[in-house]
Image: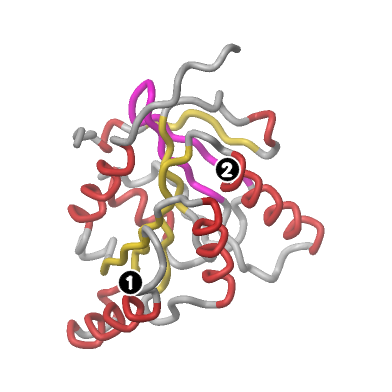
Amino acid sequence: MAKFDFSKAVYACAAHRQHQWPPDRGVEVAFAGRSNVGKSSAINAIANHKQLARASKTPGRTQQIVFFDVDAEHRLVDLPGYGYANVPTQLRRHWQRFVTDYVTQRACLRGMVVPMDIRRPLTELDQTMLRCCWQTGVPTHILLTKADKLTRARANQALAEVRRTLTEQPHTTVQLFSAVKRHGVAQAREILCGLLSQRLLPQQPS
C-alpha cells in the first residue's frame, strides 16, 4: 500500500457543473455527509491543514464539488453537504442530482468517506447516500465524528451499534473520529491510503 502525505494536498478546482470536473483519470476518494456533521473539519484534520476545506458557519452553504490534488494522480474530493432544508428547493434538487451523478458516473472514484455525527448516525439521508455507494460498488468508510462529545463508553457503544446495523453491507467500515481531539486521524489516513492505492485508470484521450 502506497503512503500519501496529505499535508501536501492543495486546492485544484471547484465545480458547479459536470463539465467543470477534472479529467476522469487517476484515483479519487470523496467525502460526503450531512451538513454540519464536521466534514470540512475532518478533511482539514486528515490533511493537517486549518483551511484546506472551508467550513461555513451556515450549514448547506457549499454548493460545489471541490477537488484537492494530493499529487499528480490522486485527489480528495469534497462533495456538497446534503440534508440542509433551508435552501431553495430547486437548488437542493440540483445538489442531489449533481452528487448522485458524481458517485454513479465518476470512473476514477475509488472510495467514499461518509462523516456522520456520532449522536445522530444513519439518518434517512445518510442511508440514501450509503445505498448509492453500495449500488455502484464503491467502498465506503464511515467517520463517526464529534466522538469527543460522548464519553468513551457511549462512543464505543454507538460504534458497535452502527457496525451491527451494517454488518451485512459490502465494503463498509466504520470508526470513531474527533477533529478537535484528533482522535482517529491516523486511522482515517490509513484507510485513505488504502483506497488511493487502488489501480490507476489508463490515460483517457483528451
Q: What element carries label 2?
A: strand
Residue 30 location, x and y as percent? Answer: 45, 46
Quickly name the residue at label 1: 146
The image quadrant of residue 18 is top right
Q: Which of 104 and 42 is in front in this view?
A: 104
The image quadrant of residue 135 is bottom right
Q: Main secondary structure of the magenta part?
A: strand
Residue 50 location, x and y as percent? Answer: 33, 47
Q: Which of 89 and 105 is in front in this view?
A: 105
Q: Which quarter of the rendering shows the N terminus?
A: top left
- Counting residues from the start of the chain, the first of labels 1 and 2 encountered is 2
Dot 1 crowding, Cα within 10 Å, few <14, some 14–19, many 20+: many
Q: Which quarter of the rendering shows the C terminus?
A: top right
Specify the amino acid type for callout 2: Ile
Above or below for 108 versus 114: above
Point out the residue furthest to the top here: 205
User: In the rendered picture of this protein, how many numbered marks are placed on residues?
Assistant: 2
In the image, taking residue 145 as reference, residue 206 lies left or right, namely right
Residue 194 location, x and y as percent? Answer: 26, 43
The label shown at residue 51 is none
Residue 98 location, x and y as percent? Answer: 67, 47
The residue lying at 20 percent from left, 33 percent from top is: 2
Magenta-drawn segment: 64-79
Quickly name the residue at label 2: 65
Q: Nearer the viewer, residue 179 or 73?
A: 73
